Amino acid sequence: MDVVPGQKLNFKNTEIAFSYKSDAELNQLKWLFSLMNNSKLVALGSALTPLALKLHFPFVRRAMKATIFKQFVGGESLLDTQKTIDLLYRYNTLTILDYGAESKSSEAELDKVMEESIRAIEMAAANNSVPVVSTKMTGLADDALLIKKQAENKLSADEEQRWAKVVSRLDRICKRAHELKVGVMVDAEEIWMQDTIDDLVNQMMEEYNKSQVIVYNTFQLYRKDKLDYLKSSYDHARAKGYMLGAKLVRGAYMEKERERAAANGEECLINPDKEHTDRDYCNAIRYCVDNYQNIASVCASHNAQSNLLQAQLIEELQIDRKHPHLNFCQLLGMSDNLTFNLAEAGYNVAKYVPYGPIDEVVPYLIRRAEENSSVTGDMSRELKLIVDEIQRRKI
């Protein structure tokens, strides 16, 4: 995979991808991904694990902590993540901290998430290798309130007060980040609450992105309206005198959103097929790189071609590989072949490092297991790379 003549960015280089793993750790990884490659086993575990934890089965907690939790999560607390942060930095890889709380509803729970996000920002400021933290609006606002706000239903007096608190929570997070010069990425959510979140994030960007990009919105390119929305967001930012922060993802709620649109007789905003999504994602990458002086973007993708495209565009335009507006990131525990080969080549690349008590991160862990399962019975991409490295090491 040529990037520039004489240089290679080879995402099949497993020696670099797994250099941070010992032989024993690599064999354990093979065992774990072999289990996750069994779609029936993953489906059973996904159904039973939340109940088992709720019933306090001790062996389930211990088993999870030693396996899937260890692979995909940085620790149960913010301080626990320091070991992962330091390990990644030894391999020229940055960290994006993500407190794994979602779908909270009580005011006390929502305030707790805000306070945890601010602590993460303060910890990030003390680590050169943690430029950004991530937050979810479903951890800062009740889902029902976000949905009602978007539906343009009149809020009651109590709901108006609760909405003011939602705005205040995100503002306090962004204000602290601005003071300490740490980025904040706001995750995308389902269609029926995303417009509300977009409006709120735009408000924060206008306030805090005037001299540098602090706040990032997330653009889900599996939606057929999001490439145009990325461009209109940039135009709005230019008109209002601030810089745009854009994290580019393919998206996470496709099946749920299709089902809802069909059930309600609504237009489906999801691209008709993967080819259209890939096209929009590539065009979004090109747009952000072309306008990199006023857009700070993140190629947040596990797709090798998407990452290669951004790397090639950086080379073609002769932009510094370390320019702070051009970034890559992948999830902890996945796509090490992309992350560590990009890091070795000198690009800005980070791992998304979630953390939190096991009970809090179970939904996240279930999604990771489901992503890595294979309905065809073939080895997953991750497992094949692990096996390739084991064979290369002759262990």
Image (spheres, grey):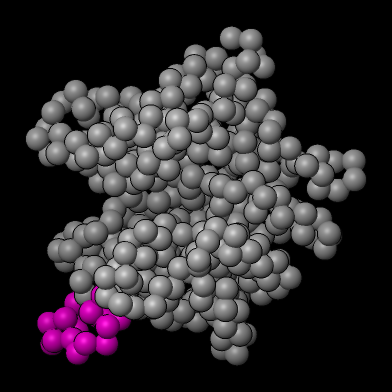
Task: Please name the predominant secondary structure of the magenta segment in the image.
Answer: helix
Q: Is residue 58 above or below residue 121?
A: above
Q: Is residue 393 at all visible to an observer of this figure? A: yes
User: Does residue 149 belong to the magenta stretch?
Assistant: yes
In-front residue for pair 63/124: 63
**Quadrant assignment, res 189:** bottom left
Rendered position, 139 above or below 69: below
- For the point 50% across and 81% down, which residue is it? 206
Between residue 216 and residue 125, name the one nearer to us. 216
Q: Is residue 25 left or right of residue 120?
A: right
Residue at 63% x, 41% y: name it. Answer: 338
Picture mark count: 0
Confirm whether the magenta stretch covers residue 226. Answer: no
- Please, which residue is most extreme toward the right here? 5
Residue at 33 percent across and 61 percent down: it is 256
Q: Position of residue 62 (x, y in %)?
A: 24, 25
Q: Is residue 113 left or right of residue 252?
A: left
Q: Which residues are magenta?
A: 146-166
Above or below for 152 versus 386: below
Say if 45 sits above or below 121 in the image.
Answer: above
**Position of 392 compared to 354: left or right?**
right
Which residue sits at x=50%, y=67%? 271
Query: Which corner quadrant holds the C terminus?
Result: top right
x, y percent for residue 132: 50, 56
- As rendered, which of 117 and 74 lies closer to the eye? 74
Which part of the image, by quadrant, shows the N terminus?
top right
How far from the left and from the top, in percent, is residue 249? 52, 59
Residue 190 on image: x %, y %: 35, 66
| Residue 158 shown left or right of residue 388 in the figure | left
